[in-house]
Image (cartoon, rainbow, N blue to C red):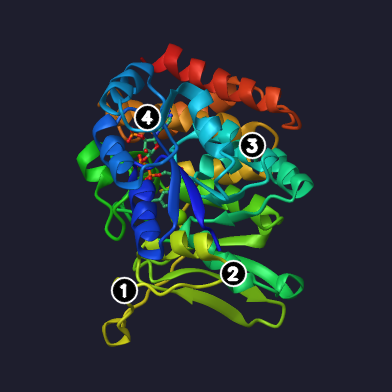
Amino acid sequence: MTKNVSILGSTGSIGRQTINVCRRNGIKVKAITANSNTELVYKQALEFKPELVAVFDEDAAAILQNKLKGENIRVLSGMQGLIEAATLQSTDCVVTAVSGSVGLMPTLAAIDAKKRIALANKETLVCAGELVMKRAREKKAEILPVDSEHSAIFQCMHGRENELSRILLTASGGPFLGKSLSETENVTPEMAVSHPNWSMGAKISVDSATMMNKGLELIEAMHLFSCNCEDIEIIIHPQSIIHSMVELKDGTVIAQLAAPDMEIPIQYALTYPERASICNEKLDFSKLSDLQFMLPDLEKLPCLRLAIECAKKGGTAPAIMSAANEMAVALFLNRKIKFNEIYKAVSEALSHIPATNADTLEKILEADSRARDFIRENYN
Ligand code: NDP
Ligand code: MG
C-alpha cells in the first residue's frame, strides 16, 4: 500500500479527490503540481507541507515561490518541475492526474524511477501506449488504472487473464445521448460540460459529450490489458452504475458496480492490493430498478468512429488524433469553434498528417506537435 505520494495535477478534479483519499488514509503527500492555479496549490502546500510544489507556468511559479517564502518547500516550474515531482525519492506512488499529453514525459520518468503509477492521464497511453507499457515491463514499474472503467476491468479480470473472451467497456453516453448531429450543432461549452453522472474537468467533460472519451478509453484499455480493438465492445449504460465488465470464455460476465464516485478507483489504485473503507455514498439496490444498455450509433458519434479507426490503425494515428482533439476542445471551450467542428478538426488533422509507426519517443512527439501545429494554423 502507498505511504507517500506525488500528485501531478493536484488542483484538478482527480487531483482534489486524490487529496481526499490521502487525508482519509493517512497517505503523505510529498509533491503536488498545478498548471497555474497558485491559490489552490498554495492551500494544499500549507496543509500537507510537501517537499516539492511544481507549477508549470513560470510566472505563476514565481508568485508561489514568493508566497511560500519561509516554508521549507522547493518550488519548481515547467516540465522539469513535473519530472522532479514524478521521480522524488521519498515518493512510492505517482498519481498522474494532469490533463493531456503533457503527462507523457513525467509518466516515463516515473517508470524509469520504478514508481507505482496510479494512472488517470489517459492521453499518455493513447499517444504512447506501446512505448509506455514496454518501458513499464522492462523497469518492473506497476501501472494501476484510475479511470473508473479500467479500474473495473482490472478488478473483474484479476487472475482470470487466461479465461477472458471479451472486455465490455461501458459508457454513459454523455449529456447528448441519442442526439443527432443537427441537434448538437449549437451546443455551448456550458451544455457540453454538464455531465449527467460525473463532475469532471472541462476537457474530459467535452470528450464525454463527443464520446471521444470512450475512444480514448478503448485505446487506453488495449494497452493496459494487451488486447486488440476487436476484443473490446463498447456498451452504452446511461446510469454509470456498472463501470465495465469482462466476458469469460464460457459466457460468464463479471461486472464491477459502485456509485459513480472517482474516489473509489483512486483509492483502490493507492491501496492496492488492499482495500480501504470509504464512507461516501454506497449503492442502494432498491433504487436501481432501471439499468439500461445499448450499442453506440456510430453515425451519430463521429468522434468515437474516428477513434475506433485510429485504434485499428495504430502507430502514431492515436497520438495525432489525441493532440488534435486536445487543441480542438480548447478552441471549443474558448468559443472559437462550434461543437461539431471538433470532429471536423480532428479528422482533417488525421488526413493531413501521415501516421508512422510509434516505436520511438521522437516519432510520437513529432506526431503530437504536427497535429497541434495543424490545428493552430487552420483553426485560430
Ligand atoms: P482537470 O482539468 O480538472 O485538472 C487538470 C490538472 O492538470 C490540474 O491540476 C491542472 O492545473 C493541471 N494541468 C493542466 N494542464 C497542464 C499543463 N499543461 N501542465 C501542467 N499541469 C497541467 O482534469 P481532470 O482531473 O478531470 O482530469 C485529469 C486526467 O484524468 C485527464 O487525463 C482525464 O482524462 C483523466 N480522468 C479524469 C476523470 C475525472 O473524473 N475527472 C475520470 C477519468 C480519467 P491547474 O488547476 O493549475 O489548471
Ligand atoms: Mg472513464
Q: Is mark 1 within 8 Å of ligand 1?
A: no
Q: Which of marks 4 and 1 is nearer the N terminus?
A: 4
- Mark 4 residue type: Asn
Residue bearing mark 4:
35
Callout in the foreground (3, 2): 2
Q: Is residue 299 left or right of residue 224?
A: left
Residue bearing mark 1:
279
Residue bearing mark 2:
273
Q: Distance between the residues labelled 3 and 1?
A: 34 Å
Q: How far apart are marks 4 and 1 (CA)?
A: 31 Å
Label 4 crowd bin: few (<14), some (14–19), many (20+), radius 10 Å = many
Q: Could you say whether the residue bearing mark 2 is in a helix, strand or loop?
A: loop
Q: Does the residue labelled 3 lie within 8 Å of ligand 1?
A: no
Per the rendering, the mark at residue 151 is: none
Q: Does the residue labelled 4 lie within 8 Å of ligand 1?
A: yes
Count numbered badges in the picture.
4
Residue bearing mark 3:
108
Q: Which of marks 4 and 2 is nearer the N terminus?
A: 4
